[in-house]
Image (spheres, rainbow, N blue to C red):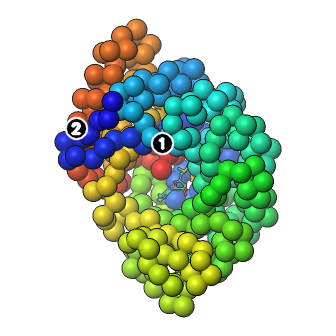
Amino acid sequence: MEVKDSFGRRIDYLRVSVTDRCNLRCIYCMPESGIPQINHSSILRLEEIQQLIELIHEAVNLRKIRITGGEPLVRRGLTSLIKGISPLAETVLTTNGILLPEQAGDLADAGLSRVNISIDSLKNDVIRKVTRRDVTLEMVEKAIRAAKKNNLNPVKVNCVVLEGVNLNELADMVLWAEKMGVTIRFIEHMPMTDSLCGYVPREVILQKIPAEFIKTEGTADMFVTPSGIKFGIIAPVAGGMCVNCTRLRLTAEGELLPCLAGGDSLNLRDKLRSGSSSTEMINAIQNLVAKKPHHGACGGVSMWRIGG
Ligand code: SAM
Ligand code: SF4
């Protein structure tokens, strides 16, 4: 069944955070000390995640499911979850790529369609400063090659634009993406809880890309270079994105959120564990969708918790 919210948006895209843990500590996402310790039992088991995705699919008829985190590839058993959910809707994944070379083949065999890989600089010292871990460009390039080898195409790369960190590298990153055969998207930094960075608006991001790099402006946020490589700008803060938002988010603790910025939510874990019927849960999901706000303002939540 297709479900629209009260603003006529067809809600059919679910982002699922399978863990709030991560092997990195990006300065715009997590505190240096890591995330607060929470009781292991409050995190959904993989079978529960699958059950909840099936119920959400019954409630809204999903078109796409994105697996995210924390870092989704640190969650053991992820392949079996992907195998279980990929027949329902196109299943894609966002990762920092560190563990991808060893997992890409199994994930592709399990039905994963494609991946987005995050990297914010081409300079190892800057990558280390941003991730607060010993990550190198070579490690991320290896992840991209593994994704391509296993047909997890098209591979997209996410780069959060950070004042005083990578603003002077954007043109080089477009050229690098062209060389690697990936689509790069520059993301406006969102001032979430736990973020330590300055915000750079879309117009400034665009000014940093030389005019000769842009042959056509495909859509408002997708551009094409003279050699035909696309790059994008994702501007959640400058605005415009909320109007067309079709997303729901499920946290690793089973909270279903209709908006990244907070507001109404539904604890599906508690409903599932207390034995609520499928009909009751599907109705509750549809009621929540109806309450999806027209737009939200970021700031009161942590990105590692809701998965971007
Ligand atoms: N660990 C995976 C990764 O980094 O790709 C998946 C989870 S991460 C929370 C998902 C995406 O959110 C990444 O592309 C990351 O760069 C982005 N992100 C995290 N914090 C952000 C922030 N404050 N503003 C904008 N994007 C952010
Ligand atoms: Fe981890 Fe991704 Fe957050 Fe970086 S952005 S700390 S890789 S969850």
Q: Is mark 2 within 8 Å of ligand 1?
A: no
Residue 297, x across and y down, in percent: 29, 55
Q: What count of labels does the image hold?
A: 2
Residue under the point 53% across and 66% down: 185
Residue under the point 55% across and 72% down: 230
Residue 217, x across and y down, in percent: 44, 78
- Badge 1: residue crowd in 10 Å (few <14, some 14–19, many ≥20): some
Read off the residue under disc 2: 291
* Disc number lying in front (1 or 2): 1
Q: Would you place residue 128 above or below residue 304 in this image? A: below
Horizontal arrangement in the rendering, residue 190 relative to residue 295 (left or right): right
Residue under the point 30% across and 64% down: 240
- CA separation in Å, label 1 and label 2: 21 Å
Tag 2 secondary structure: loop
Residue 61, x across and y down, in percent: 39, 33
Residue nearest the observer in this picture, 138 or 32: 138
Q: Dividing the picture into quarters, in which one does residue 118 lie?
A: bottom right
Q: Looking at the image, is mark 1 or mark 2 earlier in the sequence?
A: 1
Residue under the point 71% across and 51% down: 151
Image quadrant for the N terminus? Answer: top left
Tag 1 secondary structure: strand
Residue 190, x across and y down, in percent: 42, 60
Read off the residue under disc 1: 64
Q: Is mark 1 within 8 Å of ligand 1?
A: no
Q: Is residue 98 something one can see in this rendering?
A: no
The amino acid at mark 2 is: Lys
Q: Would you place residue 263 above or below residue 186 in this image? A: above
Q: Is residue 127 something one can see in this rendering?
A: yes
Horizontal arrangement in the rendering, residue 96 relative to residue 62 (left or right): right
Q: Would you place residue 6 above or below residue 278 in this image? A: below
Q: Would you place residue 73 above or below residue 46 in this image? A: below
Residue nearest the observer in this picture, 26 or 156: 156
